[in-house]
Each structure stands twice: as structure tokens, then as C-alpha cells.
Image (cartoon, rainbow, N blue to C red):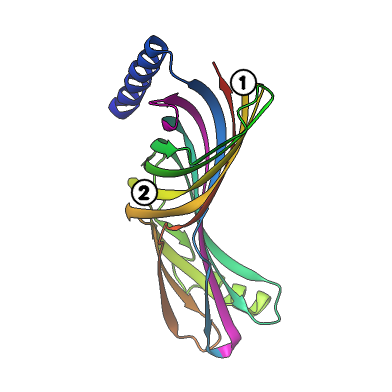
Amino acid sequence: MHKIKFVIIYLFICLSASFAQKKTIAIGLNYEQIVDTDRGYQYDQSITASYSTKRERLALEALYGLSTRLYTKSAIGISFYNSELTIGRLMNPCFSGIHISNPYLVVSQTVLYDIVQFPSSGFLKIKVSPFLKFDYEHLLSKMENAKGFSDLASNEAVQFIAEFSIPALGAKTKSPIGIFSVAGGLSFEVILYKKMGVYYNFGYSHSLFGHSMIDAKYKYIDNEIHALNCKSKDSGFLQKIGLRYYY
């Protein structure tokens, strides 16, 4: 809660200063996606596994100009964190999986510098801006630690293996309380009538701390219990689209 108050106060101060200096001011809404590179595994008995992590964000933003080319942007919103481990067998459409899904509060601060401003007509303006961004995400829900089969030697697990011809899977999961990331890339924006901006960002995000974990165990017809431990990288290519209105 204190972090939210700090962001709101910071936004108010920056916007007030921009109004006083008659600098560029804009507010908007954006959607962002950050995807880890999927990881695949293959084991004996034609067993395959896949592990993936993705974050999707919706945020409100305020952009304010520090000069004719230098801008800073603050945003606050919701991040939807999803991490999944699936396991199955080749040529079998059935699979079992462990899924982490949590909402996070996200706050971010971005610095942009326009290297292209063309043309400067009243109808259309195109901007290309490198950016540097810092994000912090804070967990909003309670964590669920145990998922899947709690006892792989149980009758339920044996029946599952016999019915679907895939391994029985159980796991303990861990979600980070907080995730801090730094990102960089390019922003492309089209501004119509000096008022409505449509932009697309492409870059790379790297998490400095905060990762999820899935410590899984599975059993198939050999009746041996095998371990499969996965930890998210929470780093990958980001894409963002947004709309903003200039005052």
C-alpha cells in the first residue's frame, strides 16, 4: 500500500511540474507481454515435458516531457503471472500439468529519448525512441504450494496411469513475493493531430530478482519416482501496445 501511495504522489508531483513548465503531458493505457523461452525435455519411455512462463500486464500510464526529446513515464497496473509444466508421451494427445497463476501489482518507471521526430506537421508525427524501464511486481494473492498427486503410490495415481497412458504428476510450487526487472528497447509511436498517440514497444526484459519454482515428481509404468525441478528465468522479449492522449 505504501508503494502505491508513493507512485500516486510521484505522478502528481511530476504532472504538476510539467503543467507549470508547459511541458508535454499525456495519459494512456497499455498492454504488455513478457515471455520466457519455452524449455522442452525428453526422457525414457517416450516421456516429454515442457515448461513455460509468461507475464501479461494492463496498466495506466502518465507521460511527461523533461525537454523536447527527453521523456519519463510512470505506470501502475495489474500483472498476470502464469507458469506451467506439462508432461506426457510422444504420439499421445493426453497430458498432465502443473500451473502457477497469480495476479501482481506492477509499478514501473520509464525513460525515453526521441531519436526520430518526423514530420512535425499538425496532422501526423512519427517518433522512434530508445527506452530504459524499471518494473516492480508485488504478489496480491495467497500462494498454493501443493498441486497434482500428493501420493504417487496411491491407487488414484495408478488408475490415472492405466487410463491415460501418461505419467502421474505431483509438485510443490513457489511464487515470488516480488519481482524486480529492468528492460530496454525501442518505442515506435504515431501521433495524430498532436493529441492521440498509438505506440508499439519492442525490447528485452531481465529479472534481477524474483523467480517461481516447480519441484515436480512423476511416475510411470516402471513404478520409479523421477524428479523434475524447474525455475523460471522471468527474462525474455517484451512487446507492448498502447494508446495515450496528449494535453
Q: Viewer-nearest of labels 1 and 2?
A: 1
> Which residue has dot 2 on it?
182
Q: Residues within 10 Å of mark 1 (few under 14, many from 20)?
A: some
Quarter that holds the N terminus: top left
Residue closer to the observer: 188 or 216: 188
46 with respect to 109 (left or right): right
Query: Which kind of residue does numbered mark 1 sit on?
Result: Lys
Q: Is residue 57 magenta?
A: yes
Residue occupying the point 56% across, 20% down: 246
Q: Which mark is residue 84?
A: none
Residue occupying the point 38% across, 52% down: 175
Residue closer to the observer: 212 or 110: 110
Closer to the chain start, of discs 1 and 2, is 2
Q: Main secondary structure of the magenta part?
A: strand
Residue occupying the point 43% across, 38% down: 113
93 with respect to 101 (left or right): right
- Can residue 140 be seen in the rendering of this structure? no
> Which residue has dot 1 on it?
195
Q: Would you identify the image quadrant in which residue 127 lies?
A: top right
Residue 198, image x and y in percent? 63, 33
Label 1, secondary structure: give it: loop
Residue occupying the point 39% across, 37% down: 111
- Can residue 28 be seen in the rendering of this structure? yes
Q: Residues within 10 Å of mark 2 (few under 14, many from 20)?
A: some
Query: Which kind of residue does numbered mark 2 sit on?
Result: Val
Give the extent of the magenta segment: 45-71
Residue 63, image x and y in percent? 46, 26
| Placement of 79 over or under 70, stated as above or below | below
Residue closest to the far top: 20
Label 2, secondary structure: give it: strand
| Placement of 169 over or under 134, stated as above or below | below
161 with respect to 21 (left or right): right
